[in-house]
Image (spheres, rainbow, N blue to C red):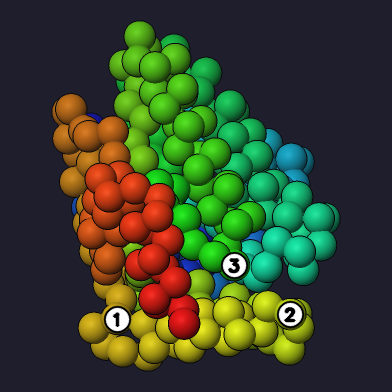
Amino acid sequence: MSKKTVLVTGASSGIGKETAKTLIREGYTVYTAARRIERMEDLFELGGIPIKMDITKDDEVVAAVEQIQRECGGVDILINNAGFALNGPIEDIPIDDARYQFEVNLFGLARLTQLVLPYMREKRAGKIVNVSSASGKIYFPLAAWYIATKHALEGWSDCLRLETKPFNIDVIIIQPGVIGTEFGDYLEPMLKRSGKGPYSTMTNALAKVSRDNYLDPNGSSPPSLIANIILKAIKSSRPGTRYAAGKSAKPLIFARKWFGDRFFDRVLEGMIR
């Protein structure tokens, strides 16, 4: 393997950090980007190159890409992992918060992708890995804005895959299920906003289900599972277009696809009753 340059966003925790560790150990040149650069010191010690970057700030995104171009020529493999979950009833979520959800989960990664594409296109080689979610193919109450970003990312990635195919650039979607990361941190703001209002019954029921998943050792999958899937995908000469992995990902996607809306509605209603 010629030494390839990788950029991993959202690398300060969870899937992003575990992916960065895995790729550093595999011998890639790994740039790790996140707002909290102090939380990537361990990656630096392993041989990673941390960059402070807020995916919603264009000047920081441009600066990160320019740094990699100066030092390595460009990005061979982009792993768009940065993202967060905004949860709560549609009626209760301020529309500016919803816009910010899209800025982080879709528009930020789209801008970064635009900036790395010329190098890949000129080399006629590259891989773009977009970390979506099982939620990109299903739905769940109290997660409308997050799920909307993931549905959008899935369609956006499909279009990008066809546009870049003539240049030998692969676009790969990763669909994690329930993963043991700090994504569970969304519960406190959701409960503060909606735990006592008209949607309180549903909100508190969802919070309980989520806590049970994150506290149960068997309720989620480790981030390393997704990191290894990403490694498999980028090492493949003909990667799949989608990889669903992690707790509940495949069963939920299967049920949604083959049994229809009403059946899936009943499954979800049973979970949050």
**Relative side of 101 to 172, left or right:** right
| Residue depth check, mark 1 versus mark 3: number of the one nearer the observer | 3
Q: CA distance from mark 2 to mark 3?
A: 13 Å
How packed mark 1 is, by other alpha carbons closer than 10 Å (few <14, some 14-19, many 20 or more), is some
Q: Position of residue 177 (x, y in %)?
A: 34, 62
Residue 68 drawn above or below residue 219: above
Which image quadrant is residue 161 in?
top left
Which image quadrant is residue 203 in?
bottom right
Q: Element at badge 1?
A: loop
Tag 2 near tag 1, CB within 8 Å = no
Residue at label 2? Answer: 198
Which residue in the rendered view is the most extreme toward the top? 166
Q: Position of residue 125 (x, y in %)?
A: 33, 20
Q: Position of residue 88 (x, y in %)?
A: 65, 70
| Residue depth check, mark 2 versus mark 1: number of the one nearer the observer | 2
Q: Element at badge 2?
A: loop
Q: CA distance from mark 1 to mark 3?
A: 20 Å
Q: Amino acid at mark 2?
A: Pro
| Residue depth check, mark 2 versus mark 3: number of the one nearer the observer | 2
**Relative side of 194 to 77, left or right:** right
Q: Element at badge 3?
A: loop
Residue 142 is labelled as: 3
Q: CA distance from mark 2 to mark 1?
A: 29 Å
- Quadrant into which the N terminus falls: top left
Task: Work out whether residue 253 can be spotted.
Answer: no
Residue 167 is labelled as: none
Mark earlier in primary sequence (1, 3):
3
Residue at label 1? Answer: 219
